[in-house]
Amino acid sequence: RKGVKIGLFKSPETGKYFRAKVPDDYPICG
């Protein structure tokens, strides 16, 4: 099943976290 994964990324400019869509082949850690 192909679903849209939402990952949490930290912006190096502001230091804030933001959510973005990640591709299916993106390695998810933790």
Image (cartoon, rainbow, N blue to C red):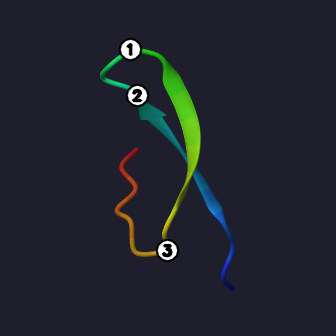
State the quadrant of the N terminus. bottom right
For marks 1 and 3, give the one nearer the viewer: 1
Q: Residue at x 40, y 44 (%)?
A: 30
Q: Are marks 1 and 2 in contact (CB under 8 Å)?
A: yes
Question: Mark 1 = which residue?
Answer: 15
Question: Mark 2 = which residue?
Answer: 10
Q: Residue furthest bottom?
A: 1
Q: Nearer the viewer, residue 18 or 25?
A: 18
Number of residues whose C-alpha sits closer than 10 Å to that of mark 1, classed few (under 14), some (14–19) or many (20 or more): few
Q: Secondary structure at mark 1?
A: loop
Q: Nearer the viewer, residue 13 or 19?
A: 13
Q: Residue furthest left?
A: 12
Q: Earlier in the sequence, mark 2 or mark 3?
A: 2
Question: Mark 3 = which residue?
Answer: 24
Q: Residue at x 49, y 74 (%)?
A: 24
- Name the quadrant containing residue 9: top left
| Spatial separation of the CA atoms under disc 2 and disc 3 | 19 Å
Q: Residue at x 40, y 13 (%)?
A: 14
Q: Are marks 1 and 3 in contact (CB under 8 Å)?
A: no
| Place of residue 16 in the rendered image (x, y in percent of width and height, measured from the top left) | 47, 16
Q: Secondary structure at mark 3?
A: loop
Q: Amino acid at mark 2?
A: Lys
**Residue 27 as seen in the image, left or right of residue 23:** left
Q: Nearer the viewer, residue 28 or 4?
A: 4
